[in-house]
Image: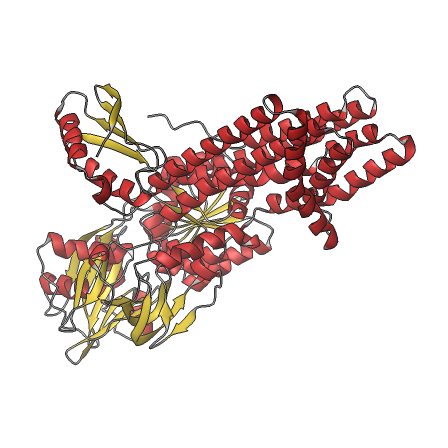
Amino acid sequence: MLYTIVQDIPGRLRLRCGRSRITEVEAAGMTEALQAIRGVSHVRVAPANGSVLVIYAPHTDTARTQTLDYMDTLEQLALPQGSPHAETFLVSEDSGFYRDIANMALRRACLRTLLPPQLGAAITLARAVPFVIDGLRELLKRRFTVDVLDATAVAVSLIQRNYASAASIMFLLKISERMQQHVNARTRIALQESLLTRAETVWMVGKDGVDVEVQLSDLSIGDKVHVRSGQTIPVDGTVISGTASVNEASMTGEAVPIHKHKDATVFAGTVCENGSLVVRMDALAGASRMDQIVRLVEESAELKAGVQAKAEQLADSLVPASLAAFLATLGITRNLTLASSVLMVDFSCAIKLSTPVAVMSAMREASNQGAIVKGGKYLEALANADVIVFDKTGTLTTATPKVERIITLNDMNEHDALKLAACLEEHFPHSLARSIVQAAKDADVHHEDENHAEVEYVVAHGIVSKVGRKRVCLGSAHFVFDDEGIAKPKGLDEMLEREVPRASTVFLAVGKRLEAVLCIADPLRPEAASVLKQLRDIGMSHQVMLTGDSDNCAKSVAAELGIDEYHAQVLPEDKSRFVEDLKAAGHTVIMVGDGINDSPALAAANVSVALNDASDIARAVADVSVMDSSLESLITLRKLAVALMRRIHRDYRTIVGFNSSLIALGLTSVLPPTTAAYLHNASTVAITAANTRRLLPPASN
């Protein structure tokens, strides 16, 4: 492959292969191959101009030599192919944006300086036709929108034979439109990369009918995948056996679970809430699913911030007022030039363009900060929230609790109790389940040979299965002793409170007898106390903790973190009811949770947040998915949301003040209409461009 070296300094090598010689798929393949070279830390391949940037450890030339050797071996007609990542699309989008802006500016310069006036006027007339048609189309539908106002402004300039003014208006409108498209495209790309929840491993049904844990990337079309309660469906496919209720809210926006049975179609990223399915993989994981999620985020009016929707309504409502002012001025003065001063300056254009750009830019910044916000209205809720509700286990505590102790009763020993518990829990995503599976792995307890029947998961309570002919129950005290009727040994509560007062407990019963208690340490997140204090300092003073644990455990945690309101031994429906009660009292509520049992409360909150180590269903239900496991993201999100609202309100004041001044200067003949139009449109572009800037300063290292 032919290339030239355009930059070669220690640690940085830039090559140029020529425009349009590399596709996005080939750029991804080259990126993957170059990143595999030892010492290379970053690779960026730009399909638009064929640029290849390689950053490597500067203290060695090995990476540089191997990079050039690799490029020398490439054949132009047989370039490697890969799966494009978000960065590849971002490079392509950025290149296209800057190219389009440069082309618009170049055409504008040529139109003004190089072409004869008559030819320039003809081109301006031709370019004005789409604007006029759009305005007429809206008028025929009896809708007075910004398109009508733009068309009228262009038409008036043409009637006055002021072709330069018409060209300026159209140029600035096109710049604003392309800028909004660019911000929206970058946000869509970030959402495409991060919005979907995908498991790294899945349970594939082997040829002998036994479930085998494999990497998702190893699946092929036609493979069968076993999906159980609480798990995310990893592939697009067809149900070949089993029945289940599937939550497709992340795809369709519909909160009511859909009953799935044999021959039904399921989609990657949706969640199996109850039941069990065997799914035949029919397409590459998530391909069609991804498109639907992007359309949901782009098009759903429900996801718009209230302030954005109000801005659009306000913008459209101002159009008739501007037209009326134009006609009134024309009727009074009989001066088209003076009347056009009113027409050339309006409030609606700037409001309608700048606000959505501000919202989408904030969503993009959130994604850059590692948080996927599924709609602008959730940023508004984050800014306005006055109550934040936390689940305890896995949220305020670490998501990787450890089995601290196993208390056995009767004839069962610790090894057998851990083996049986891990065998049942390995199918479920909650943090307590993961701790039991990890404890078995650490103790070298092999539990892969499953000798139990189908596992039934009872949300927020426990697990039921059969081993041999005996019924096995694993779960909370309420589930084992109250729901299942297992006899509680005398003095058990006193012994547990004495021996393990801070531990969460999971009870294991075989037959009708309690055999073991697994005591799981639930340490607080190291940043929890600091984060709660900072949230209080930025307006989140009402903080609540909800937990299914005992009152003693909850009281201890609340005291350590400085939380003044907590509720213990809370069931999922109680959490949801508590959130609904807060909303009914006029509060705007943030709910932060991680488990299947938190999903009803997450769905009920004004805005819900799930951390990266939350269960699949919690992340699917949550309005904001944080890509790391630190509570500090909550501070960033709150500050970002508040800064966004501040920016939007500041824009309103600037737009109204500046454009009112332009109208006044135009009516008093201080400014000619052309100058007023230029300043108005220039200010719209400037405000829109300013709204693409970061809201928060870069994080200090």
Q: Residue at x 28, y 69 (%)?
A: 279
Closer-to-camera residue (95/268): 95
Q: Quadrant for the C terminus, please.
A: top left
Horizontal relation, residue 371 to residue 22: left or right: right
Horizontal relation, residue 161 to residue 62: left or right: right
So how many labels did they put on this image?
Answer: 0
Image coordinates of residue 649 in percent, x first then y, are 62, 34
Residue 549 seen: no
Closer-to-camera residue (364/389): 364
Image coordinates of residue 4 in percent, x first then y, are 25, 25
Q: How is the image coloured?
A: secondary structure
Horizontal relation, residue 274 to residue 574: left or right: left
**Residue lying farthest bottom?**
469
Quadrant in the picture for residue 511 = bottom left
Image coordinates of residue 350 in percent, x first then y, are 64, 35
In the image, is residue 262 above or below residue 560? below
Q: Quadrant for the N terminus, please.
A: top left
**Residue lying farthest right?**
332
In the image, is residue 286 above or below residue 539? below
Q: Residue at x 63, y 27 (%)?
A: 682
Residue 121 seen: yes
Quadrant in the picture for residue 513 = bottom left
Q: Residue at x 41, y 27 (%)?
A: 698
Image coordinates of residue 269 in percent, x first then y, are 36, 58
In the image, is residue 286 above or below residue 386? below
